[in-house]
Image (spheres, helix red, strand yellow):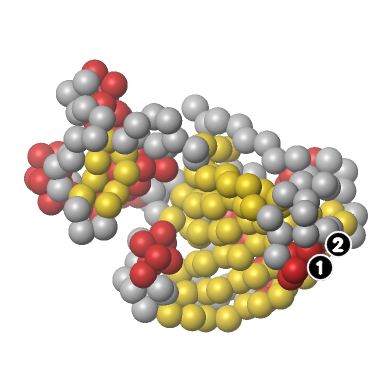
Amino acid sequence: MTQKRKRVVKYKLIETDILQKIKSGEYMKGQLIETEQELAKQYNVSRVTVRQATNNLVAKGYLSRSQGSGTYVTSQNVVGRTTVAKSFTEEMHELGKKVTTEVLDFKIIPASEEISYKLQIEKEMPTYYIRRLRKADDEPIQLETSYMNVKDYPDLSYENISESKYKYIEENKNLTIDFSHHIVVPIMPTEEIANYFECDLYSPLLKVLNTTYLTTGEVMDFSELILNTDKYQYQSYRSK
């Protein structure tokens, strides 16, 4: 436990230092920052610790990564938001609604290049593919497609995902969820989505690309959420 706390402190200090350099203008927008190896040597830490620090700054929109190129200081005009992590179940219960989950698919697949990048794992690594239809008071609210690293959660079960993934993470695995990074885009429904939401093909919906991080700096999961905007109003709260 002591070692874990020390690691969190180190990556938070590095994150703060890099952010100060961005805000002071030492790192300019569009500038390529040092490699993980160079930063690890500069701060006398492991590359894993550096990655945890830069992950948070990527999620908060201060940095962006380009595969094969490096990590850049980005413009602050980003679409994504850093939000307080709150599960769908928690949110609906706060509204006094009964939550039910229909598991549409639950299997293990090899991670594609895109998913391996999102989860920060090697390509082709075993990855959970989870598809769920979330309902509140029997009304279809959210169609969720999620990806999780099998190696990190080998005991994840059908029963776990039939309830709340956040509950599984925090109660079964004794891990703490830190924040989620959302990118929201409007979409038009496909016939499949329209059937799930019982809406027409001309009603615009919201698609949320969501990456959830643990306090260790590691990615918990990556999800694509389709929201039934007739039944659900998307809200975002900035974390400190």
What element does badge 2 sit on? loop
Q: Secondary structure at mark 1?
A: helix
Q: Amino acid at mark 1?
A: Asn
Q: Position of residue 145 (x, y in %)?
A: 61, 65
Residue at image mark 1: 195
Q: Is residue 123 visible?
A: yes
Query: Going by the image, does 106 lie left or right of 55?
Result: right
Q: Tell me the kind of residue under disc 2.
A: Glu
Asked which quadrant contains residue 17, the reply is: top left
Residue 59 horizontal/vertical position (percent): 42, 43
- Can you tell which mark lies on residue 158? none
Task: Determine contact: label 1, label 2, CB under 8 Å.
Answer: yes
Residue 14 appears in the figure: no
The residue that label 2 is drawn on is 198
Determine the residue positioned at 78% across, 51% down. Answer: 203
Q: Position of residue 155 (x, y in %)?
A: 55, 75
In this view of the protein, which residue sits in the foreground, 7 or 232? Answer: 232
Residue at 29 percent across and 49 percent down: it is 65
Position of 239 with respect to 113 (left or right) is right
Residue occupying the point 75% across, 40% down? 233
Tally of numbered tags: 2
Dot 1: few (<14), some (14–19), or many (≥20) neighbours within 10 Å? few
